[in-house]
């Protein structure tokens, strides 16, 4: 075969190969590559769903959304194929924003460069769009807390999802860049509040410039939430606690609804959203006062507020009678140890029931010794201590109810009588939370143990009620009616003529108990009460860290809350009050 014929044959073979390949690309794989081309020229601009609004029990807005702007860049702008173009665009953006541009790389979808951009900057970016090819301004809903610090531990705050959180939540549809609840109701009910994101698919040219909108889907707003919190009462409780570190819990004793919950120090949730408050955010994160700790759900020694549990156990186990008298010389001798009463001169001869009214430590040292740790632990648990109340916000601790087995296991030691006398006055190993103690005193007021709850209703964007918080009775009381009557009367006497007189409010009879709990540093101060005594409507747990004296620091907090409640939520019913005495 001649050289010319070989050349013609080679050219023919190559031509047939090219034609065959073109046929494959066009006829067999054409659809696939056409799809690829469309995907490369189409980008999705996300439209995050507005989170659901949060209201108080009277319909006042506690959390809402405000529109802010975000800057997104289409990925072609960040391509290293045209380094000069990339530097120019990002440099112009950096000058407008007053900062160096950083971003999280992604495959082929728009990258959020900055959120919560001030409107004036957003307008400048829009004006310079010819020089900022592929840069898109998008309006976003941002969380806003109109009452700032008020109720921050109830409401919580939102922030960008972190890698560890994403690993747990990815299967539920969460993705990188999402904003989620980090604490409080925002976190506990995030699945209802977050809504469903929308967005629009846009066509872009080879330089990444938008040309037209291909598809658009409106975001579905999150569900609204109505709380049991009474905003007016919440503000009154915040004001009553003031600048003290501590907590206040106010419950409806008949339903378990939380009417107010305060933890101090607190924080302004807006600092996690507003650029103007970045310095305040830094102070919060670097400070030493632990403002994110919810003290209403944290554990502390109860001190004398625990004596209602000790007396309940003593009466039901028949180790003492209400009318039995003991002698208090101001101290209690056990083996080689001397334990003192808070009243150094002593109470003299005093009945067991009056011992609760006067908070006589000697009476309760003796009751603790007679009962021993296991019987005390039994009644503490029957009152709900040592386990979570399952209130519907995060951070709750379960506390500690010690017994002989616990001490042997944890400490490797036997239980001593000295441990028992401490146990009887709410000292030693026992640990409780303010919300637990509020639930206990609510149970004493009504005779029923109820689970505290904060969310009353969840309402979808189309007005359907998708969840209702309802009263849930956990159990009755572990004591009979006769013993309960003894305890109730003793608590009435505490406020009327004993250590709780500081909480006495004209026109509103209250029953309560003071507590001073020893711990490292100055003692903690407690005051628990319910009112009105005839028909209880609220129960208050007031706790002041290192407040020293329950009959002063915390009783004054409760007094101010009771006064506000009388003036703003109760119709005067003096005749009913007298009848209930």
Image (cartoon, rainbow, N blue to C red):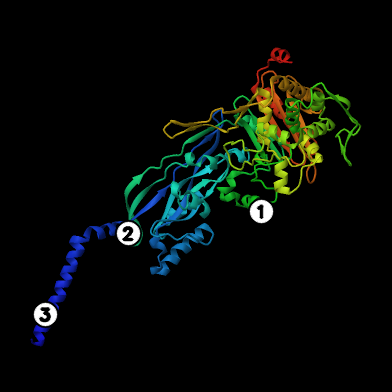
Of badges 2 and 3, the one in the foreground is 3
Label annotation for residue 9: 3
Mark 2 residue crowding within 10 angstroms, few (<14) / some (14–19) / many (20+): some
**Rendering quarter of residue 256:** top right
Q: Is residue 366 left or right of residue 99?
A: right
Whether residue 51 can be seen here: no
Mark 1, secondary structure of its residue: helix
Mark 3 residue crowding within 10 angstroms, few (<14) / some (14–19) / many (20+): few
Mark 2 and mark 3 in contact? Answer it, CB < 8 Å.
no
**Residue pictured at 23% horizontal, 57% vertical:** 31
CA separation in Å, label 1 and label 3 = 80 Å
- Name the residue carrying label 2: 40
Tell me which numbered mark, 1 or 3, is placed earlier along the sequence: 3
- The image shows residue 87, relative to residue 306, as above or below, that is below
Whether residue 112 can be seen here: yes
- Name the residue carrying label 1: 286
| Residue 523 locus on image (x, y percent) | 79, 41
Quarter of the image for the N terminus: give it. bottom left
Tell me which numbered mark, 1 or 2, is placed earlier along the sequence: 2
CA separation in Å, label 1 and label 2 = 45 Å
**Residue pictured at 19% horizontal, 68% vertical:** 21
Mark 2, secondary structure of its residue: helix
């Amino acid at each position: 075969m001649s050289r010319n014929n070989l050349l013609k044959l080679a050219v023919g073979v190559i031509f047939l190969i090219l034609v065959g390949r073109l046929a494959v690309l066009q006829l067999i794989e054409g659809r696939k590559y056409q799809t690829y081309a469309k995907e490369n020229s189409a980008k999705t601009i996300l439209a995050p769903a507005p989170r659901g609004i949060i209201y108080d029990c009277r319909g006042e807005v506690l959390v809402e959304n405000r529109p802010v702007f975000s800057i997104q860049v289409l990925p072609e702008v960040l391509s290293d194929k045209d380094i000069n173009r990339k530097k120019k665009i990002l440099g112009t953006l950096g000058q407008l924003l007053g900062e160096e541009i950083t971003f999280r790389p992604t495959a082929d979808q728009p990258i959020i460069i900055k959120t919560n951009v001030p409107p004036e900057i957003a307008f400048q970016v829009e004006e310079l769009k010819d020089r900022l090819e592929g840069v898109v301004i998008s309006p976003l809903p941002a969380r806003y807390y109109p009452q700032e610090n008020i109720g921050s531990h109830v409401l919580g705050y939102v922030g960008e999802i972190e890698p560890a959180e994403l690993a747990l939540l990815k299967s539920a549809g969460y993705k990188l860049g999402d904003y989620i609840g980090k604490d409080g109701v925002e976190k506990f009910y995030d699945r209802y509040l977050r809504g469903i994101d929308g967005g629009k698919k846009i066509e872009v040219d080879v330089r990444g410039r938008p040309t037209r909108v291909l598809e658009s889907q409106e975001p579905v707003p999150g569900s609204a939430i109505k709380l049991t919190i009474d905003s007016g009462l919440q503000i009154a409780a915040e004001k009553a606690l003031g600048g003290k570190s501590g907590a206040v819990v106010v419950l409806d004793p008949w339903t378990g609804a939380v009417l107010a919950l305060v933890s101090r120090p607190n924080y302004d949730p807006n600092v996690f959203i507003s650029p103007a408050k970045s310095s305040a955010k830094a102070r919060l994160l670097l400070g030493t006062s632990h403002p994110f700790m919810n003290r209403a759900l944290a554990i502390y020694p109860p001190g004398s507020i625990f004596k209602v549990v000790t007396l309940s156990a003593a009466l039901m186990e028949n180790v003492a009678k209400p009318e039995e008298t003991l002698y208090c010389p101001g101290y209690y001798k056990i083996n080689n140890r001397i334990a003192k009463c808070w009243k150094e001169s002593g109470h003299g001869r005093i009945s067991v029931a009056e011992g609760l009214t006067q908070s006589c430590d000697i009476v309760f040292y003796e009751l603790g010794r007679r009962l021993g740790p296991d019987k005390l632990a039994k009644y503490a648990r029957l009152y709900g201590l040592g386990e979570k109340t399952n209130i519907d916000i995060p951070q709750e601790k379960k506390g500690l109810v010690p017994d002989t087995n616990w001490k042997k296991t944890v400490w490797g030691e036997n239980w001593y009588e000295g441990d028992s006398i401490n146990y009887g006055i709410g000292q030693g190993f026992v640990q409780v939370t303010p919300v637990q103690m509020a639930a206990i005193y609510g149970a004493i007021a009504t005779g029923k143990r109820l689970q505290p709850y904060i969310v009353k209703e969840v309402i979808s964007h189309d007005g359907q009620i998708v969840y209702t918080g309802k009263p849930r009775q956990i159990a009755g009381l572990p004591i009979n009616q006769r013993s309960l009557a003894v305890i109730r009367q003793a608590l009435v006497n505490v406020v009327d003529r004993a250590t709780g007189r500081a909480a006495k409010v004209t026109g509103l009879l209250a029953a309560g108990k003071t507590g001073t709990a020893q711990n490292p540093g100055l003692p903690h101060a407690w005051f628990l009460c319910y009112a009105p005594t005839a028909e209880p409507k609220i129960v208050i747990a007031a706790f002041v860290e290192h407040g020293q004296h329950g009959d002063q620091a915390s009783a004054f907090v409760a007094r101010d809350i009771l006064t506000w409640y009388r003036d703003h939520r109760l119709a005067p019913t003096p005749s009913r009050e007298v009848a209930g005495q």
